[in-house]
Image: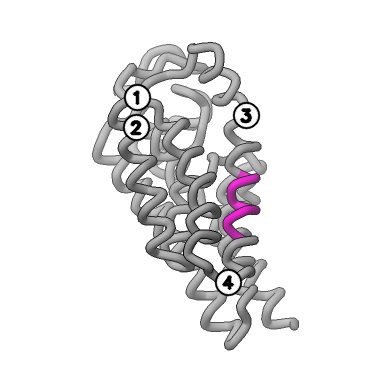
Amino acid sequence: MVLNIVAIILCYLLGSVSFSVLLAKLLKGIDIRQHGSGNAGATNTLRVLGKGPAILVLALDVLKGLAAVWIGKWLGGDSGWLPGLCGIAAIAGHNWPLYFRFRGGKGIATAIGVLASLCFLPALYAGIIAILSIVFTRYVSLGSLIFVVLTPVFLIIMNFSWPIFWTSLVICIFAIWRHRSNITKLVQGRENKLGSGGKGKGGKRVV
């Protein structure tokens, strides 16, 4: 039990490492949460810093999720729940990072890493549909929501274990909560599209 708690805390601390904040500070000396959409994630990194930094942030955030699940598997032994709980802890850390005054991102890239580790095929199927939606609509937020909503559906269809299903459902709830302003903008037709640029809290894009 103690080892399980240690694993969850460790994964929260790992998730709290906000690569978008660190990279923006390193490259431009700015707080990315004061620019673009104000979100500490890969999409806003793309808007503010460009493709290269965005790809790096995306990869590192996905790796956080992968690492968290494997920490859970390593320390949890035969536990069916600990890998998922560690994944959720990493996403919680990304969304509410201890090191950055609990102002983080929306957790989708980290969720991709978690779900790809726990249930590769359901996450892949949901991801393909999500990517197609982004290609046709250019709404990253819509694709993100489609991914987290469809993954539990595919888990039910494919008869995966309940611990993985409940993990995916909690991740879905997290994502919907973090995207609540995006959902409002989508309904109102005011949501930013991919490639539309990023004027926001700090004004012009940082170059």
Q: Residues within 10 Å of mark 3 (few under 14, many from 20)?
A: few
Q: CA distance from mark 4 to mark 1?
A: 33 Å
Residue shown at the point (53%, 79%) measured from the top left: 73
Within 10 angstroms of label 2, few (less than 14), some, or many (20 or more) residues?
A: some
Rendering coords of residue 5 (x, y %): 71, 74
Residue 10 in which image quadrant: bottom right
Q: Secondary structure at mark 3?
A: helix
Residue type (three-letter) at the residue carrying disc 4: Ser
Q: Are marks 3 and 1 in contact (CB under 8 Å)?
A: no
Mark number displayed over residue 161: 4
Kindly identify which residue carries mark 1. Answer: 137
Number of the front mark, 2 or 4: 4
- Real-space Cα distance between discs 2 and 4? 29 Å
Which residue is denoted by mark 3 in the rendering?
180
Q: Position of residue 42 (x, y in %)?
A: 40, 39
What is the magenta range? 167-174
* Label 3 to label 4: alpha-carbon separation: 29 Å
Label 2 vs 4, first from the N-terminus:
2
